[in-house]
Amino acid sequence: MSEAATNGDGEDDIVTVNFKLTESFLEEIDDTWQGRGFNSRSEFIRYTLRDAVEFPTFDRDELLALLAAEEDVRNDQTMSAERARERFGTDDE
């Protein structure tokens, strides 16, 4: 978890941020934070945003590579695992 202050302990000023969500998404958020034992919606949202910034699931290059791989699959430009092992010399034998 981040070292960023979220409780107003001095280093950074705490600011309020407003954003819009659908009611159904807000209900999902509420169900999630309560189900995971967070003390409040704000605590859960801060934790989730901090985690997304510090440990993004994909960076842009990874996303582009994933999209290119998906295009290869759709265009039937892939090879079998056996062929890949032969090509790259990774046979188990």
Image: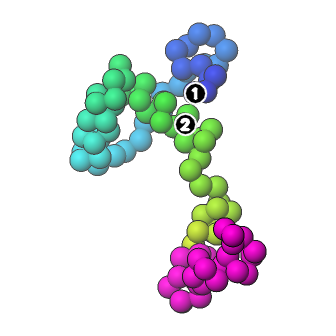
Q: Position of residue 73 (x, y in %)?
A: 53, 82
> Are the residues flagged by discs 2 and 1 in contact, CB closer than 8 Å?
yes
Give the mark, 2 or 1, whose residue is nearer the N terminus: 1
Residue drawn 24% across and 40% down? 27
Q: Is residue 34 above or below residue 48?
A: above
Q: Residues within 10 Å of mark 2 (few under 14, many from 20)?
A: some
- Residue at the spot of label 1: 1
Q: Nearer the viewer, residue 33 or 45?
A: 33
Name the secondary structure under disc 2. Answer: helix
Residue 82: quarter of image: bottom right
Instruction: Residue type at mark 1: give it.
Output: Met
- Residue 55 in view here: yes
| Of the pair 55 and 15, the residue shown nearer to us | 55
Q: Which residues are magenta?
A: 68-93
The percent coordinates of residue 67 (x first, y second) are: 57, 72
> What residue lies at 34% left-to-right and 29% top-to-bottom?
36
Farthest-out residue, top: 9
Residue 71 in sight from this viewpoint: no
Mark 2–mark 1 Cα distance, whole angstroms, equals 7 Å
Q: Is residue 38 magenta?
A: no
Q: Say which residue appears at 64% left-offset and 83% top-offset.
A: 83
Task: Determine whether, in the image, residue 86 is placed left or right of residue 6.
Answer: right
**Would you identify the image quadrant in which residue 26 lies?**
top left
- Judging by the rendered image, the residue that carries numbered circle 2 is 51
Would you call the spot at circle 1 few (<14 residues within 10 Å), some (14-19), or many (20 or more)? few
